[in-house]
Amino acid sequence: MSSAAADYALGSTSEVGRLRAVMLHRPGDELRRLTPRNNDQLLFDGLPWVDRAQEDHDAFAELLRSKGVDVFLLGDLLAETIEHSGAARIQGIAAAVSARRLGTHLADDLAGHLRGLPAAELAHVLTAGMTFDELPVTPAAASSSLVRRMHHGPEFAIEPLPNLLFTRDSSFWIGPRFAITSLALPARVRETSLTDLIYAHHPRFTGARRAYESQVAPVEGGDVLLLSPGVVAVGVGERTTPAGAEALARSLFDDGLAHTVLAVPIEQARAFMHLDTVCTMVDQDAVVMYPNIAESMSAFTLRHSDGAVSVTGSRPFVEAAADAMEIEKLRVIDTGLDPITAEREQWDDGNNTLALSPGVVVSYNRNVETNKRLRDSGIEVLEIEGRELGSGRGGPRCMSCPLARDEL
Ligand SMILES: NC(=[NH2+])NCCC[C@H](N)C(=O)O
């Protein structure tokens, strides 16, 4: 980090360079907000047992630490940011307290209350949200707010953010810069207000510069794969839109952070919400890919030369990628699974690996067959328990935002 103690620089130019620092989010009370009535809208397929999810997540963090990775927790960074910066406090509150939902009277009241909270408590509210029952009791507000009278107690005055767990999506690093994404779905939009605060105001990130400032259209980090220095693949489907992919590409070109961007169409379906649910890199020249689509995956190639952007294709993804990466062949680990096992393990994030270095990946233990084939292909697979983490549909890659990787 920029601090004297760390011997690495912030940033990343690949998916597989040795991982030095990562941001995770330890799941907290925001998961306790999930009910059978709101879980669909909040993008969970079930109700995780939160204590166990925390245990599983602690073990994930511990595994990374044992491999020499510095682990930073989003909740801690957020509390420290608010502690450190009055401006961050104000911005965080402004993004969370909606006059559209609460009316100006109650919104002003609540914002005033939040301004006075200790940093850790405010960070908790910003992540776990707040129900009407939990609103501060001020005599004036209770008697004079129609909004308070008419909302049911368990409804949310501030929505919780259970998908913060998936730190991959709300920001990513490319080269020496960080990008704040632009999340597509209402349940997740506010997440970036928190990552934005952290990078803008936490002393650890002082001096770090932004990529992709415009944020005009949806781009989510789970769709962004750094195939090799200068070459980026962007999934386009349920989350990242064509406009988002094009805006990101042009911005990366303008900033000299990429010379080629591959836009990869993916099916607009829950199971494939991001490119990293079907394809992740496991080595400098190798990917693990959902076999049922490996053949058909294609890409448009956007290139930047002499100040102009050209779009060509589409053509098979693996060919377009190999050309852009200037390698003979992009190896696709042949998991050789029958279509049903493949579909089951894709759903359970078998293809969503997090590389710690070339040829060493973290994966959920339940994806027995995929992990076996990875090992047969010479990949070292470090397994974690995903029982209570998986119902949000995200694996080790989704749950991690690399802050620093060594250059290849
Ligand atoms: N990079 C990823 N694949 N992230 C998974 C995100 C899962 C989350 N529940 C969502 O639907 O948004």
Image: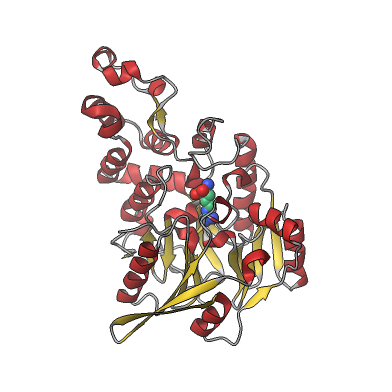
Q: In this rendering, is residue 316 above or below 40?
A: below
Mark count? 0
For residue 143, which quarter of the picture?
Answer: top left
Tell me how the rendering is colored: secondary structure
Q: Residue 80: image x %, image y %?
A: 38, 45
Image-based side of 25 in relation to 211, left or right: right
Q: Residue 265: image x %, image y %?
A: 49, 66
Task: Say whether residue 23 is visible.
Answer: yes
Q: In this rendering, is residue 342 above or below 328?
A: above
Q: Residue 366: image x %, image y %?
A: 73, 52
In this orientation, which residue lies closer to the viewer: 168 or 310? 310
Q: Residue 56: image x %, image y %?
A: 64, 45
Quadrant housing the N terminus: bottom left
Task: Say whether residue 25 is visible.
Answer: no
In this orientation, which residue lies closer to the viewer: 381 or 392? 392
Image-based side of 328 in relation to 403, left or right: right
In this orientation, which residue lies closer to the viewer: 325 or 50? 325
Write the residue at 40% across / 36% down. Answer: 120
